[in-house]
Image: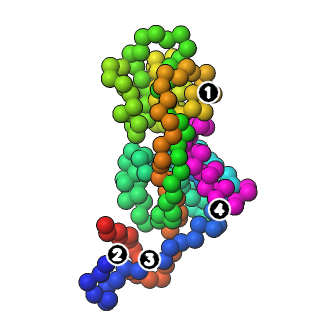
Amino acid sequence: MTAASTTNVLVMTPQSTSKIRTLHTLGPRGTNCEAAAREWFTRNNVDAGEVVLYSTLEQAVKSMPVENSHALLGCVVYPELHTLVFSNLKKLVLGECFVFPTFNMLFARRPGTTELRTVACHPAPQNLVPSGPRIILVNSNAQAALDCANGVVDACITTLPAARAAGLEIISDHGPVSMGFTIHMHRERSTNAALQGEACAT
């Protein structure tokens, strides 16, 4: 950040992520966020890290304990991530961003389904849905697979592990996608009155 003068500069000291032992993120099991959370623990040599899953990141923020050992893992393409960040400025701070490939992203269907009229899809990858079927938006790629397997929709955009777990038939495989994931930590109390908000400039 660039400031015009040195008398009113916003100084922010990065918070350490070393105390994080539990990551709260998007479920159900089989999401890219869950995989990224486990990858984060591996990269940071945390052997006993715990991943807690929620139907939405908004729910995760509300349920996450206010302790420095707990943090939220988000994804840069998550719908309304900007709203989540700016509506929680007083209690959360961005601690880290990292790049990790998603699972292979698939277009899949329930075995025996011939007419594809509806497709369950998380909002982020909905451009992978071919033209024709009606898109039914759901909270995660893993949920899309479950809805397809349970007959709620005819097909879905999901991940390879979720498709396999649900017993779905792969129509097309778009491969993995290089993705950005974010670690949001509880804001530490500061005696510096200038640290009341965050700013960034590009």
Q: Residue furthest bottom?
A: 7
Q: In percent of the image, x 60 and y 45: which residue is there? A: 35
* Residue 148 falls within the magenta-colored stretch: no
Q: Could you classify mark 2 by the number of other residues whose Cα lies within 10 Å: few (under 14), some (14-19), or many (20 or more)?
A: few
Task: Quickly name the residue at label 2.
Answer: 1
**Three-letter residue code for mark 3:** Met
Task: Quickly name the residue at label 1.
Answer: 164
Q: Could you classify mark 4 by the number of other residues whose Cα lies within 10 Å: few (under 14), some (14-19), or many (20 or more)?
A: few
Q: Secondary structure at mark 2?
A: loop
**Label 3 or label 4, whichever comes before in sequence order:** 3
How far apart in space, not on screen, are marks 2 and 4 (Cα)? 28 Å
Q: Nearer the viewer, residue 108 or 56?
A: 108
Task: Quickly name the residue at label 3.
Answer: 12
Q: Quadrant of residue 149?
A: top right
**Label 3 or label 2, whichever comes before in sequence order:** 2
* Nearest-to-viewer mark from 3 and 1: 1
**Label 1 or label 4, whichever comes before in sequence order:** 4
Q: Is residue 112 above or below residue 8?
A: above
Q: Is residue 3 above or below residue 186?
A: below
| Percent of width and height locating residue 180 | 47, 52
**Three-letter residue code for mark 2:** Met
On the rendered image, what quadrant is the C terminus found in? Answer: bottom left
Q: Secondary structure at mark 1?
A: helix
Magenta range: 27-48
How far apart in space, not on screen, are marks 1 and 4 (Cα)? 29 Å
